[in-house]
Structures are given as C-alpha cells and as structure tokens.
Amino acid sequence: VQGFREVAHLQKMLSLDNTYNEEEVRGFHARLERLLGRGDLAYTVEPKVDGVAISLTYERGEFVRAVTRGKGDRGDDVTANVLTIATLPRRLKKSSVAALPDVVEIRGEIYLTAAEFERLNAERAAAGEELYANPRNTAAGTLKQLDAAEVARRKLSLVCYSLGHCEPAGVQTQAGLHAALRAWGLPGVEKIWHVRGIDAVWSAIGELDGLRRTFAYGTDGAVVKLDDMALQREAGSTDKAPRWAIAYKYKPDTARTRLKAITIQVGKT
C-alpha cells in the first residue's frame, strides 16, 4: 500500500506546474545525501511526458486492466479503449533481462503524436467544426469516449516508464526497470540518462532539453529519480511527494506575436 501511495504521490508531483531551478535540484541531492548518509548517489534522468497518466495491470503476462490516475488512488476503467492502442502488448514477452512477475502494475502516459493531432484537426477544419485545443486534452477526451471504434480511429499512442505494484519484486533499479519494460515488449521512453552525482544530473537535464522536441510525445520537463529502488524505499515520502524524485520543468517556449485585429461584441449585459 505504501508503494502504491508513493507512486500516486509521484504522479501528482509530475502534474504540478512548478519550475525548479538549478539550486533546487542540487538541494534535492543534498537532502538525499544527508538522509541516506552517503554521497555519490546514482540517478536516472527521464523525459517528463505531457500525456494522460495510465496504469496497466498484467497477470501472468496477460493484459487484464487499464485505469486512469483519477485522484491518485481511484481512477476510471478504460480497458476497452486502451485495447485499441496498436503498441499495447496483450501479452508480455518472456526475457532473460527480467523475469515476468505474477502480477505487475505498469505506469505510463497515453498521448497523441503531433502528426495525428494535426490530422484530426485538419478533418475538423474541413467539416467546419471547432478545432481541438491541444494534444493532451484531446487524448484525455478520447479515453472517455464510449465508442471504441472512434477511439481506434484517433490512433492513441502509449509510453511506459514506471512501476506500481509488482509481485514478486524482481527489478532493483530504475535503469533496470526501463530495460525490463522494453524486454517485455512495452513501448518505453526514447532515452534515459543513468548518471552518478548531481553535476552529471544537471548536465543530463541540459542534454534532454536539446533533444526533447524530437520525441513523439510532448515533453515539458525532466524527472530525476534515485536509481536504487532499495534506497528509494529507505528515503520514503512526505505527505505530498516521494523524497527520492524531483520533476524539473523547462521554461515554456515563447514567440513574438503580432495582433492584427480585434472584434468587439456587445450584448445585453
């Protein structure tokens, strides 16, 4: 139960609009050093995916359920709609990288690629319909559709990056988890950094910023996680978030805009 709560807290933390600076990231590392009584800690640095959080459950390798994050401890069952995603494996592959657990809950994000979002909006423009606002909200609305055929037509995509409940536990590190996810046949993030020490963490955050616009999904930040899962459990969590992870959000893109005209409408009020 505690592990489930920590994952829920992490998901909530990732949804916040905080923008951490270098000093705060280094402070996160310093707190862990004091808490764990050791230096030279290893971390993973991963893309912060701007999608719809999803929990996938497999039993004896067979896919059985997909649930949205909801409020962190209770979400909506969207199994029928998630089954339309072409990259979702109905059965996990056996691999020498990591043994298949009897029961495993895998966390990730559902998203629309930029190309698919543009295709849907082009269709709506041709039909004289209001355009969708952004890929994330469109993906969230698609998951709530009652017509699975319409969901399939919109071509949702999936990326996996985290672990919830796992029985028996077999993966010992975050880097090992990413290797296991790919070995089991699940779509993972394009790139992670496995680094040691806070200087290497900060360098990886900068490298990710230079690459993130080439990814298939929206990425607005970096997630830094303590690599060793035993140390994650030792670090624990507060009421708001795990102590072993921090989400760094990049500054939003800006552009110069020319206002060409305004229309003023006057009503009764």
Image (cartoon, grey):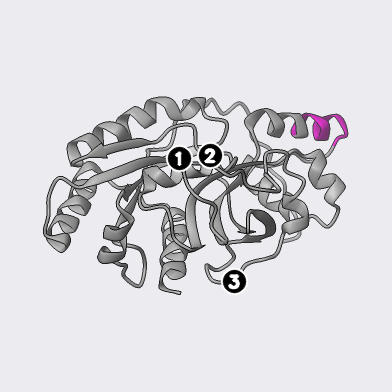
Give the spatial CA distance, label 1 vs label 2. Answer: 6 Å
Position of residue 245 relative to residue 211, above or below, is below
State yes or no: discs 1 and 2 in contact (Cβ < 8 Å).
Answer: yes
Does the rendering let one see residue 168?
A: yes
Label 3 environment density (alpha carbons within 10 Å; few <14, some 14–19, many ≥20)? few
The residues colored magenta run 121-128
Q: SS class of the residue under badge 3? A: loop
**How many numbered marks does the figure carry?**
3
**Residue of label 1:** 179
Mark 2 burial class by Cα count in 10 Å: few <14, some 14-19, many 20+: some
Identity of the amino acid at label 3?
Answer: Arg
221 or 187: nearer the viewer: 187
What mark, if any, has residue 226 been given in the picture? none
For badge 1, the amino acid type reads Ala
Residue 48 visible: no
Marks 1/3: CA distance? 28 Å
**What residue did someone put label 2 on?**
183
Q: Which residue is mark 3?
A: 74
Q: Residue at x 36, y 68 (%)?
A: 240
Point out the tag, 3 or 2, that comes first from the N-terminus.
Answer: 3
CA separation, marks 3 and 2? 29 Å
- Asked if the stretch drawn in magenta spans residue 129, the answer is no
